[in-house]
Amino acid sequence: MIAPSILSADFARLGEEAAAVGGDGTGNGADWLHVDVMDAHFVPNLTLGLPVVQSLRAATDIPLDCHLMISDPDRWAPGYAEAGARNVTVHAEAAHDPVMLAKNLRAAGSLAGLSIKPGTPLDPWVEVLRHYDTLLVMSVEPGFGGQSFIPEVLDKVRTVRNLVDTGHLTVLVEIDGGINADTIEAAAEAGVDCFVAGSAVYGADDPGRAVAALRDSARRANPHRWTD
């Protein structure tokens, strides 16, 4: 799965930017549209909020993948599920009761995602992940786009991939940060299912073709997992 991040899109043309990665109806477009929500508290930057997500939901058929880099997600996250997001991801470092939050997100209509920063160990969260649908491994520090990929986080990807493949977890493995033509193959080989890409897509002359090229690179790197 390829999830272009609108953090790198033109905020004045978000509807058009979503359409640019929508594909041609043959499965070549984006699988999810990644929406980075930042509150200037959990991370220093400030980006989009619920009203923009509601507008995007009305403007595109691409499922929305909302990544909430915010304080107190227990209070705010269910609203994004109620707005129609397909997947709502909260940070392990910010959630007060992550198990109850996962239940509330599912009850509100979305998948429940848990994200961990590059420096956050995976082991303390394995049991909690039994209540979640996705794990978003951050491969940069959350808060800003355009950062360089941190390859050391792939050890966490390999660990959770093994837990999924052996039946101990059922999460979809997602990665976010510095994904481009130079890094996606290593992430695919480690076992990532869903790749968030910002500038690699929206910095290209043709964002739709950039999505297709990233998908092809991932398939070449892990042909046994990535099939048509």
Image (cartoon, rainbow, N blue to C red):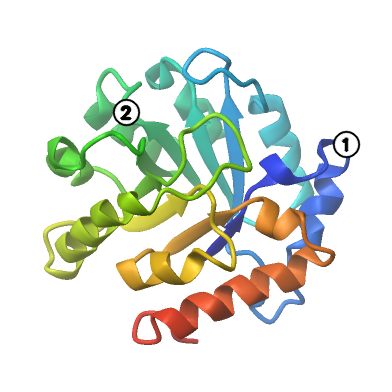
Count of numbered labels shown in the rendering:
2
Query: How much space separates mark 2 and mark 1, taking CA atoms?
Result: 32 Å
- Is any part of residue 57 visible from this angle? no
Where residue 55 sits: x, y (%)?
75, 36
- Judge left or right: residue 28 versus residue 228: right
Classify mark 1: residues with Cα within 10 Å, few (<14), some (14-19) or many (20+): few
Q: Which residue is mark 1?
A: 12
Classify mark 2: residues with Cα within 10 Å, few (<14), some (14-19) or many (20+): many
Above-or-below relation of 7 to 71: below
Where residue 77 sits: x, y (%)?
46, 27
Q: Amino acid at mark 1?
A: Ala
Residue at x-position 36% and y-position 35%: 117
At mark 2, the secondary structure is: helix
Where residue 92 sits: x, y (%)?
31, 30
Q: Which quadrant of the view contains residue 58?
A: top right
Above-or-below relation of 85 to 168: above
Q: Which residue is mark 2?
A: 101
